[in-house]
Amino acid sequence: MKRFLKRRLPALMLSAVLVLSLMPTALAADCGHNSWGAWQKLNDQQHQRTCLVSGCSGSQAASHNWASHYEMDSTYHLRKCTDCGAQTPHELHQYSGSMKSDASNHWDQCIVCGYKDNLGGHVDLNNDLRCDTCGYSMPVSTITVTFKNGSSTYRTQSIKKGNAPSNPGTPSKSSSGKIYTFKGWTTRDPGSSAIYNGQSYMTSSEVSKTTLNSSTTYYALYTVSSRADSIVYEVDPGESVDFDRTDFREVYEDVYDDDFDYVDFYPDSSYKSSVGYIYYDYKGSDEERLDRDDLTDNYFEYSNSSSYPLDKLTFVADKDAGSRTLTIDCTLYGEDNELDTTLEIKIGRGSSSSKADIVYEVDPDDTVDFDRGDFKEYFEDEYDDDTFDYVVLYPDSSYKSSNGYLYYDYKGDEEERISKDDMEDYKFKYSRSSSYAIDYLTFVADEDADGSVVRLEFTAYGDEEDLDGVLEIRIGDVDEEEAEKGDIDYTVAAGETVELDRSDFKDYFEEEYDKTPRWVTFDPGSSYKSSNGYIYYDYDGRDEERLSKDDLSENKFYYNDDKYGDYDLDELTFVASKDFDGAVTLNFTVWYDTSTYVDGTLTIRSKATAVAGEGNILYYTTYSSSVQLNHNDFARFFKEKYPNETLNYVVFNSLPTSGTLNYDYYNASKYGKPVRLTSSNCSDYKFYFSPDSTSDYALSELTFTPNGFNYCPAISFTAYGSGSKAVSGTVLISVTLNTMPEVYGVTTRGSAVSFPSSSLSSAVSKGTGMTMGSIQLLELPASSQGTIYVGSGTSTKANTSTKYTTSSGSQSISQLRFVPASGYTGSVEIPYVAYSSTGNAIASGKLCLGIVKSVPKFKDVNSSTWCYKYVVEMSDADVIDGYADGSFRPDNTVTYGQALKLIMLAAGYSAQNPTGSHWASGYLTKAKNDKLISGSVNLDAPITRLAVAQIAAKAMKLSTSDLSSVKPFTDTSDIYVQALSAAGIVQGYFSNGTSTFKPGNTLTRGQLSAIVWRMENYEG
């Protein structure tokens, strides 16, 4: 026993200690721990669980068991414990800086968790067989190009996909009694006849420059005419029309492939003073009137550097040459060929413009006296070497009792009311001592004539000359646009149609007679011409007929019974040309019989298209955000039409059915009163660009709140300004589910860019969550930037009326190509409306292209960087540059010296050499000399937003005299900040009806690149 106690007991006790060390802590009693609770997080390294047996306080701790996979969102990744659910700290994704790619897509991938960001399909805008974003090599394959000449194969070529075929040469075709002239190549089969009938085509040279991505068949086209179309100009009596050398070139090069050089004219005896003369350098220092011998003995060249360039020729019509056509035979010469044609100059009947030369205004039930000085000034402005003597007035249908009457010696001893029938028998004299002196004429307006316009044409006579004009008497509150309307008025958008309604003529006639009219006759003026549009009978019907001026003036259009006329009045349709932007005026007479009739004027005026897919002012928002309409957008829109005038106010003509337009939505304005605008009341309000008093409604206080998403509501408006100017337009608002991405690509100058159909579809899908079916272009680039063509040639230009589809075909998006103008570099923005497969407008977006000399590379700026567009284009323009290590550092704070350089270069200043020890000292010296800044500055200190705005506005010489009285920001009243904001170059921070500028904030290099980009692209 002693031995046991001495040798075995210590070992037994040691075993007990070891057992106890494996038991849970705080063990009150050994319960067996057969029921453990769930693991709970203890700390960042461990979790623990406790025994669930009643009375047992045992617990157990262990290290977290982290899952092998990561959980992630667009910004962070983390791992979770598989036992307790604890999370590792959120870590930002780590990207390698180079994109990964497969055959279809590219992406940035986190090197830790594998998250894919910026996933998108490959884009090859410049057709170099490499993705513009990631550099992925696109596959190369061989395709076949076949050239067909009639029913036979002319030539076959095998080329690599993405390359252009070699020049196929000039095929020929012959047939007895016909002369075939090769026109070019088309991709649409014209049949064995191979006749050109208006198809799109390319010359052989253009074919050799057109890259192809699939096997293609070209078909030869021929004309069968030995004489070219005439060159036609139209002009009013007493007016002039300039020759355009391109008109002659296009006629020649429609027949021959070589370059047009010059033209010979062969006038006959119809070229004489009573019709008019052709002048060289008309109203210039070298003005010369060309007689018949001058035209015959000289040739007139396409080159503007020649002795007699075509572009320096002007025809001046005689003032009495109305309704005549001058025809001159001519021969066009090129390098290898010559072509006979005719020049036709059509002289209209005379001015039928509705715009007045003299305007009087009078209130209803009031009078206005005529002033002889108005007629004298109008006459002698035209004939300063003649003396005005008298005027004869010619009233139209607006001169009637319901508007008022003209009186001689009103309320005097010789008072006489001048009737419509007698008016043109009077000569109203300038001399006050003569009978019927102008100064004794008074118009007395009817008490119910508010808003009416009385129009009197007149002829002013001098000792030797006479001059036609128009006098308007505007009664009461006359809308400027209303003043330009005829007795019957229609409006139509370019490229659209409007039907003439016989009831309009009936209603007009029955204002004078209690009878139903029987027929109507027309007398079209010079504005009725092809460049505006034509009236058709039975348009789009089996008996469709386009009506010329002679057709309209020589036929009767019956109201109900065809025994009274030749054409049914109710079957007339005006078809506006695609470039229609003015007005067509036709005088008409509505007849019952030869003694019972009423004269009137029909006007057909262009209007801004207000359908989905059109817009002059564009806004983009999502369904959960309201849009604050910017009064400066309306001012810039007005200035585009009238650069020398100032916007006064805007009236809204119609509102969309979905969404609301509110005035003072946030109840924060000091102008006007809060109001919700509706279709019935919107035209009752004038919203002033620069309100004079607090009772005026300010254009800056309008807010549109959408209702729903994926639609494009339109708001039509008319902007009124100084000089009695007015212009109508449309606000188009794109309301989408998510923010619409901008599609942007960079290409080198001179390189054609195919529209990236897949990228546009992807952008629309991200913005709307829907599949795009087609797009409609809202605006085409300026010709100085380039041209959008349809197909591989240059014969068919894109337009703003066609919907280009995502499917294959001649009108598909993939057929659109932007060809930059020769030598052009800069930014091109092409706005569009996207339609669903069912034809509904679902979004508006932009395709933006940077045309550069070469694509700059910065290691920290790529296509996914928010300021990529600004940095690339401004770097290419030599306005901004990076650092020696190849970085741009867009998030670095901008210093005063850096900002000064960038702003001055963007404003057109040349580079400045240092004038001191600091690299930017030359810019500082120049800025002080030009009063862009004053006082001392630290060129290495951060610059504020206020200082940037002040320097930029001064450098750009922005006007501060025509700014709105409404200050755009609550935290600064600086005039230069307001000028730069009005130009659309800087923006503020908007919240709950209040906009701030934060003038003391600094800027990053990326933010300043956006500002100088807007400066560079400003078109003020």
Image (cartoon, rainbow, N blue to C red):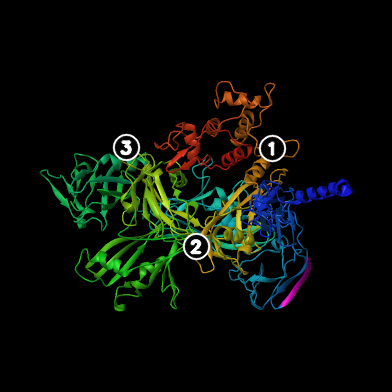
**Residue 103 locus on image (x, y percent):** 74, 62
Spatial CA span between label 3 and label 1: 48 Å
Give left or right: position of 774 versus 595: right
Q: Amino acid at mark 3?
A: Ser
Q: Amino acid at mark 2?
A: Ala
Dot label at residue 841: 2
- Identify the mark at residue 693; answer none if there is no mark: 3
Q: Give the residues in magenta.
A: 152-159
Q: Check disc 2 and report its element: helix, strand or loop.
A: strand
* Residue 558 at x, y percent in the picture: 31, 73
Neighbours of disc 3 within 10 Å: few (<14), some (14-19), many (20+): few
The first of marks 3 and 1 along the sequence is: 3
Which quadrant would residue 159 be assigned to in this image? bottom right
Q: Which x, y percent locates residue 689?
A: 39, 42
What main secondary structure does the magenta stretch of the protein show?
A: strand
Give residue 855's position: percent from left, percent from top: 71, 46
